[in-house]
């Protein structure tokens, strides 16, 4: 259960629709799983940009009255998981600025690997930063560019940054969407049924607003949206794809199509592969909800071992501020996940989870199942051991806190007190997602960083 790894953000852009800010709002609802700390929307009415952003869930940040002030046919939106930077409202997005060409707003999913270097160079030249966000670098780079047109300034700016970025820019009349050359983070393009275009981190947003998936924005590609025109494509970088494989393992919603493939199907494939390479005799397969559900279905269907909901998840638990004693920590897990005692009692269970980060949650889950009467608990993980942190837009603990970077699988098994533990290996994971070339980033379990 990757509760210690969090996708940092989601982005959305709506162009050429009379209810642009409402569609951005609904899209952000669909993308809420990618960031729960802050949300924001900027709209443009052709004359001016309007921005509302605040800390909290999308539902808390916006209401009917606020949305009514976000007028215009174009809008961009963002949900944020607070990491680089801090928790303040200043670090919510869109980042808005006035500069010599007018007004501009930007939303960003990803992490710039040369952010400090660029920022320090800008500060030396007199730039004053308001936030700790790497996204603010872009505002300064665009404002200081000597090119005349915004399009050329954006190209100028993105050539100075490195790392992971799926970006959407909004000016008074245009919208631009861009993915870095490696395409670490997803970004898809769709057509809205009753007019206009949408770009979003995941296609689950399209389904909600009645948009049809056209294609992904390609790695290294910049799309330009102008009034009454189809999007214009500019190849800014030669693409060298390294798509984040963890989007399939954990981050994306199962009903999304990411990098052109169904997330649900990829997770089922992982479960089926896991059953083939890491079989074990048992009475039932149960998922750790919600992340382990599709893989557990895949494991069950491929192995013929019955699937059961052996653990229930309470979706109404927010953050709980309770004493950090051992007893209270166990209670915290039970508040979120409860065992179905009647189903589990006396049974040999295979528990499917998507990953083990620190190991403490897995240990509590095994303990909870044994206390509920399971005779054997076999833990199966639908990804390889997480040994290295991510620098491309996912918040991970430091390497020394990742249990798999310090312990062997047998040692982790002893630590979590399971009867057996096995992971999916790298080759099986790549097979599961139909990777035919070396076009996925796997750095958090191989340590092979590209940038
Ligand atoms: S390091 Fe892991 S989480 Fe980060 S982009 Fe690569 S595969 Fe995704």
Image: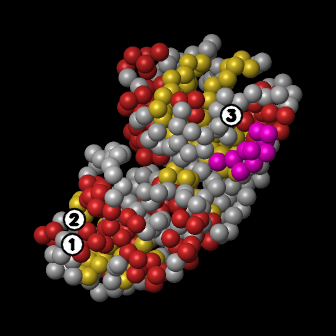
Q: In this image, 221 relative to 425: left or right?
A: right
Residue 130 % position (x, y): 67, 28
Number of on-image labels: 3
Q: Secondary structure at mark 3?
A: helix
Instruction: Give the class, few, some or many, for how many residues have Cα within 10 Å of label 2's Cα (few <14, many ≥20).
Output: many
Q: Compare residues 118 and 237 and report the one nearer the observer.
A: 118
Going from the N terminus, do you reach mark 3 or mark 1 first?
3
Residue 99 % position (x, y): 74, 20
Q: Residue at x 33, y 58 (%)?
A: 325
Tell me the distance, in whole angstroms, between the alpha carbons under discs 2 and 1: 9 Å
Q: Residue at x 67, y 23 (%)?
A: 97
Residue 371: which numbered mark, if any?
1
Residue 339: which numbered mark, if any?
2
Q: Are marks 2 and 1 in contact (CB under 8 Å)?
A: yes
Q: Which residues are magenta?
A: 111-120
**Any magenta on residue 116?**
yes
Q: In this image, 78 relative to 316: left or right?
A: right
**Any magenta on residue 306?**
no
Which of label 3 and label 1 is nearer to you?
1
Image quadrant in which you'd find residue 347: bottom left
Q: Quadrant of the N terminus?
A: bottom left
Tell me the distance, in whole angstroms, between the alpha carbons under discs 3 and 2: 46 Å
Residue extending furthest top?
47
> What residue did someone put label 3 on?
136
Tell me the distance, in whole angstroms, between the alpha carbons under discs 3 and 1: 50 Å
Q: In this image, 84 relative to 268: left or right?
A: right
Q: For the stretch drawn in magenta, what is the main secondary structure?
A: helix
Residue 120 % position (x, y): 79, 39
């Amino acid at each position: 259960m990757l509760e210690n790894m969090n996708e940092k953000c989601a982005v959305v852009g709506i162009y050429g629709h009379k209810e642009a800010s409402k569609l951005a709002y609904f899209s952000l609802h669909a993308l809420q799983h990618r960031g729960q700390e802050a949300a924001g929307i900027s709209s443009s009415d052709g004359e001016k940009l309007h921005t509302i952003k605040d800390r909290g869930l999308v539902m808390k940040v916006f209401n009917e009255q606020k949305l009514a002030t976000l007028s215009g046919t174009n809008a961009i939106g963002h949900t944020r998981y607070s990491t680089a930077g801090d928790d303040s409202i200043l670090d919510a997005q869109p980042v808005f600025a006035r500069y010599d060409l007018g007004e501009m707003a930007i939303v960003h999913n990803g992490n710039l690997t040369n952010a400090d270097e660029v920022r320090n160079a800008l500060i030396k030249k007199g730039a004053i930063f308001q936030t700790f966000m790497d996204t603010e670098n872009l505002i300064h780079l665009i404002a200081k560019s000597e090119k005349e047109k915004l399009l050329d300034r954006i190209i100028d700016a993105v050539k100075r940054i490195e790392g992971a970025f799926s970006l959407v820019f909004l000016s008074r009349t245009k919208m631009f969407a861009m993915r870095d050359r490696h395409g670490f983070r997803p970004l898809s393009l769709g057509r809205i049924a009753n007019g206009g275009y949408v770009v979003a981190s995941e296609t689950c947003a399209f389904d909600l607003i009645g948009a049809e998936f056209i294609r992904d924005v390609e790695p290294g590609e910049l799309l330009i949206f102008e009034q009454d025109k189809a999007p214009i494509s500019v190849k800014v970088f030669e693409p060298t794809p390294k798509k984040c494989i963890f989007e399939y393992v954990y981050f994306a919603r199962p009903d999304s199509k990411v990098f052109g493939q169904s997330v649900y199907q990829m997770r089922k494939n992982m479960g089926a592969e896991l059953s083939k390479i890491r079989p074990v005799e048992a009475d039932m397969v149960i998922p750790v909800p919600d992340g382990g559900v599709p893989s557990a279905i895949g494991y069950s269907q491929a192995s013929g071992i019955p699937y059961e909901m052996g653990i229930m998840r309470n979706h109404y638990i927010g953050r709980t501020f309770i004493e950090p004693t051992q007893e209270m920590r166990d209670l915290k897990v039970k508040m979120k996940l409860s065992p179905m005692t009647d189903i589990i009692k006396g049974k040999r269970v295979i528990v499917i989870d998507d990953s083990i980060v620190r190991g403490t949650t897995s240990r509590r889950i095994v303990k909870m199942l044994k206390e509920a009467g399971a005779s054997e608990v076999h833990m199966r993980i639908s990804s390889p051991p997480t040994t290295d942190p991510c620098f491309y837009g996912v918040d991970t603990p430091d390497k020394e806190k990742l249990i798999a970077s310090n312990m062997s699988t047998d040692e982790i098994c002893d630590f979590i007190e399971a009867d057996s533990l096995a992971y999916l290996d790298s080759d099986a994971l790549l097979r599961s997602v139909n990777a035919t070339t070396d076009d996925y980033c796997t750095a958090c379990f191989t340590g092979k960083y590209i940038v």
